[in-house]
Amino acid sequence: MQEQLKTIKKKVKKALDKDRWEHTKGVAYTACCLAMAYAADTDQAMLAGYLHDCAKSIPNDEKLALCKKHKIALTDVEQRNPYLIHAKLGAFLAKKEYGVEDEAICHAIQVHTTGVPDMSLLDKIIFVADYIEPKRDKARRLPEIRETAFHDLDQALLMVLADSIYYLSKGTREIDPMTEKTYDYYKKRMDTNGT
Ligand code: FE
Ligand code: FE
């Protein structure tokens, strides 16, 4: 695992621009810390963190071309907003280009932008780590979400989803219906659990 991690780190660093690489390191270490807090596999969290944005620096037209070439089905929202594709394409590249055989890692990469109802612990860790890693500084409630992430991951997940929807609704980017679906799923679950 350590050897694989070393090779992958080098390769990802080359595939990303400087800022994206700094963000990536932040996500990997934050994911590792969250894995410690929830007794999850730290190696898995680290690897998924390093790879989550591996397709991010590919130009949009190339992202679309790669998906076409490899028959990766895209939704209408993804077609219209190619920046969303890096999650799906990233999961594909993790497997094919970086040799990751662990499906749990690929799934966490695949769902890291929008979330999905009923996420695994690793999925949640990567999703939340992506939002709270130390280099992030613009989002509201960051200190609160960072603290919550280490004692109530589902609550932190819901906060990240709510704030993502809030920011997307104010900006020009389209909201992927999956983000809202995921929010509704966890909100309902939280309400029925009474927490
Ligand atoms: Fe991303
Ligand atoms: Fe990211």
Image: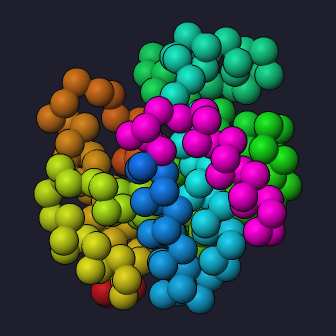
Query: Is the residue 66 above or below the residue 12 in the image?
Result: above
**Quadrant location of the C terminus in the rendered image:** bottom left
Looking at the image, which is closer to me, 28 or 123? 28
Left or right position of 171 against 103:
left
Residue 153 drawn in magenta: no
**Quadrant location of the N terminus in the rendered image:** bottom right
Residue 47 can be seen in this image: yes
Left or right position of 35 against 169:
right
Looking at the image, which is closer to me, 119 or 107? 107
Q: Position of residue 67 (x, y in %)?
A: 69, 21
Instruction: State the residue at coordinates (42%, 49%).
Output: 22
Residue 115 can be seen in this image: no
For residue 191, what is the image quadrant? bottom left
Q: Position of residue 77 (x, y in %)?
A: 47, 25
Query: Is the residue 154 above or below the residue 107 in the image?
Result: below
The colour scheme of the drawn protein is: rainbow
Q: Main secondary structure of the magenta part?
A: helix
Query: Is the residue 48 above or below the residue 168 in the image?
Result: below
Q: Position of residue 98 (x, y in %)?
A: 78, 44
Instruction: State the residue at coordinates (68%, 72%).
Output: 43
Q: Which residues are magenta?
A: 1-21
Left or right position of 173 against 23:
left
For residue 95, what is the image quadrant? top right
Instruction: State the residue at coordinates (72%, 50%).
Output: 8
